[in-house]
Image: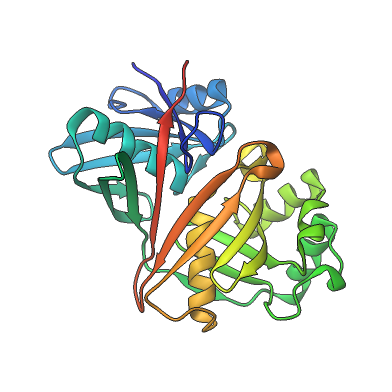
Amino acid sequence: MEILRYAAFTERPDGGNPAGVVLDADGLTSGEMQAVAADLGYAESAFLSRRRPGSATVRYFAPEAEIPFCGHATIATGVALAERDGPGTLALSTSVGVLALTTARVDGRLVASLETVEPWVDTMDPGRRADLLRHLRLAEDDLSADLPVLLSFAGNVHPIVPVRDAGVLRALDYDYDGLRALMAAEGWGATVAVVHRLAPDVFEARNPFPPGGVREDPATGSAAASLGAYLRARGEVVPPGVLTVHQGADVGRPSLITVGIPATGGLTVSGGAVRIAA
């Protein structure tokens, strides 16, 4: 078994979000995949099986649990495959549906793009909202006056929590155990997207990830897609549009995620990835 290591949504090995990638996982059990992910300690790792020309199946594991969908590990997988087989398009079967994964050379580097499943956006129960803010250690006056706290799905359910300014985002220091318990009770298996708007189509984000056993995710493709769905549902962007999300600087791994927002349907998450030495 060859375990590849890539940093996604970056052009440098010490940036972005690291992911493990196993391109031939047909002989691995779920327990063995979980053990590999735990040993790597990355936010997620991707395991491909049933590879055929133009298609494959993928499963994602965080250090402590299997995750339905992961954006950055998918981007890493796309670049890893393109480096071996050349750019192209792959129908990737995941537990949330079939995704189109496309790679191309852009300005001399490989860029991968995935199209998400159909997103949705919903309100949050007031009690759960209060619990969420309590565990994030955020007060009402820490929040954006213009953008509400909502749930958004584009492969994973992400609470979207817009805050009023960069100072609140920088100071984020949440209750890990309390947030972990709340997310488990609610079935929120990915990250909470705490975001701050820099421009109409530019945000910075921090993403606590206790369900996966990770304090903070450096780059979260599924959360960026969910933020794009949130903005589209609220009429905050005019499709077709492009959302840029800066993430990871607060944990020393700056990343850049691009989300294409069409008028309807799934969103397109794009980024590069670079190999990390073992």
- Judging depth in this view, the residue of 111 and 101 nearest the camera is 111
Position of the N terminus, as image quadrant, is: top left
Q: Position of residue 52 (x, y in %)?
A: 15, 37
In the shown orientation, is residue 251 left or right of residue 110? right
Task: Answer above or below: position of 238 versus 207.
Answer: below
Residue at 44%, 48% in the rendered image: 71
Task: Answer above or below: position of 122 versus 157.
Answer: below
Farthest residue, direction front: 107
Farthest residue, direction bottom: 235
- Judging depth in this view, the residue of 138 and 165 nearest the camera is 165
In the shown orientation, is residue 39 left or right of residue 262? right
Query: What colour scheme governs how the chains and residues are painted in the rendered image of this protein?
Result: rainbow
The quarter of the displayed image where residue 158 is located: bottom right
Residue at 79%, 56% in the rendered image: 136
Residue at 76%, 79% in the rendered image: 145
- Judging depth in this view, the residue of 38 and 208 nearest the camera is 208
Q: Position of residue 59 (x, y in %)?
A: 39, 39
Residue at 83%, 52% in the rendered image: 171
Q: Is residue 116 visible?
A: yes
Task: Answer above or below: position of 261 versus 234.
Answer: above
The quarter of the displayed image where residue 197 is located: bottom right
Q: Position of residue 185 (x, y in %)?
A: 68, 56
**How many dots with numbers?**
0
In the shown orientation, is residue 98 left or right of residue 250? left
Q: Position of residue 3 (x, y in %)?
A: 39, 20
Q: Is residue 155 visible?
A: no
The quarter of the displayed image where residue 240 is located: bottom left
